[in-house]
Amino acid sequence: MSLTIKNLSKQFDTISVLKNINLEIRQGEFLVLLGPSGCGKSTLLNCVAGLEAIEDEGSILINAQEVTDKAPKDRNIAMVFQSYALYPTMTVRKNITFGLQCRRTPKAQIEQTLRKTVELLQISDLLERKPAALSGGQRQRVAIARALVHEPDVFLLDEPMSNLDAKLRAEMRVELKNLHRRLNATIVFVTHDQVEAMTLATKIAVLNQGVMQQVGSPDEVYHTPENRFVAEFIGTPRMNLISGKLAQSEGKVWVQSNGLRFPAGHYSFREPPNEGRPVVLGVRPENVHATLGDREERTTLGVDVRVSNVENMGADLSVFCEYQDTQLIGRFLKISEKPSYGEQIRVWMDCAGCSIFCQSTGERL
């Protein structure tokens, strides 16, 4: 089922936490609400669920039907909470089927639905256990199963993996993605973890201070961020940002910074570039290399830097460098190229996939 949010605003006392939110989520999409703590993600999810009243302005539609003023039980949604919220005195079987029993669903139908769901989530052998006897990942599967049995129009997940260790989170991301493919369900997933967002989402909505910053596919928000906030928030390590001014000569465009000219002639400006305009050049760390290699010289510039830190990530290196008053971060793919702390080296910045932002507004040019 589709989910539509129109012009939604929300305040707590005099504090505005959501400001004119508009979202269109189509059937089968996996939307991730991404942003830092306190940006309004969970509040927006609670508004969709009906747990927060919309007293200011805006409307919510599920499958083109207005549900703004409906109670949560009348919206046909299912929510998985960060804490799982399982009944500690009930078995897994009882936790999953309790809601169906309250709705007086026939026993035969409950058993059929239960069997199908636990087989899907591979928890058939856990039915007689209580939550205290389950691992974090197993509890998460039970919480998801409890949501699945109601066959909702929309699934809402509020940071369901934040209590898991790194290995289990990676495993559960794969399982959740596979589950989404099998069900073709409409899912709204809240997280502040960009790795979860990039790996799970078909669409990402980035929030900051209650304002929607960008909505797009993982590739779009990563490669063409709409502003500096999105550029810095998405990506590990973060995007390199270099302040400078636009310069033009003989039909070519550069970003001029501290005596260096970074090539930008290939960049697709949304408006004609103005000579001397203060800008910020954004270059991803994977485009900062230890060698020139076979990269095109017309989009690549060599920069002399001093190494200030090196992080060994196993498959690659994150190399932190000092370039005048700016920190540059490169991802070196060859461990054999590992530099030493304090070493003076030359790095090659490939500007072919760069972003350019207005220095005053932070918006993409």
Image: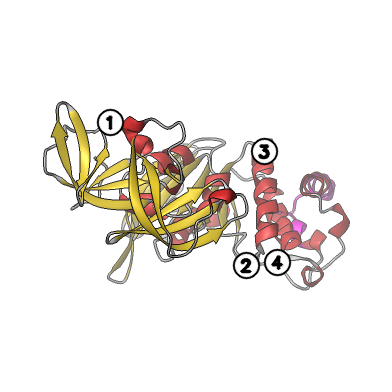
Front position in the image: 279 or 203: 279
Q: Residue furthest top?
A: 251
Q: Residue furthest front?
A: 344
User: Residue 263, percent across and down?
Assistant: 27, 36
Front position in the image: 311 or 232: 311
* Separation of marks 4 and 2 at Cα, in angstroms: 8 Å
> Which residue is disc 4 drawn over?
86
Whichever of callouts 4 and 3 sits on the residue coming sooner in the sequence is 4
Within-10-Å neighbours for mark 2: few <14, some 14–19, many 20+: some
Give the residue type that dot 2 points to: Ser
Whichever of callouts 3 and 1 sits on the residue coming sooner in the sequence is 3
Residue shown at the point (70%, 58%) measured from the top left: 168
Query: In this rendering, which labeled residue sits more in front, label 2 or label 1?
Result: 1
* Separation of marks 3 and 1 at Cα, in angstroms: 39 Å
Does the magenta portion include 116? no
> Which residue is disc 1 drawn over?
268
For residue 144, which quarter of the picture?
bottom right
* Separation of marks 2 and 1 at Cα, in angstroms: 45 Å
> Which residue is disc 2 drawn over?
83
Give the residue type that dot 1 points to: Ser
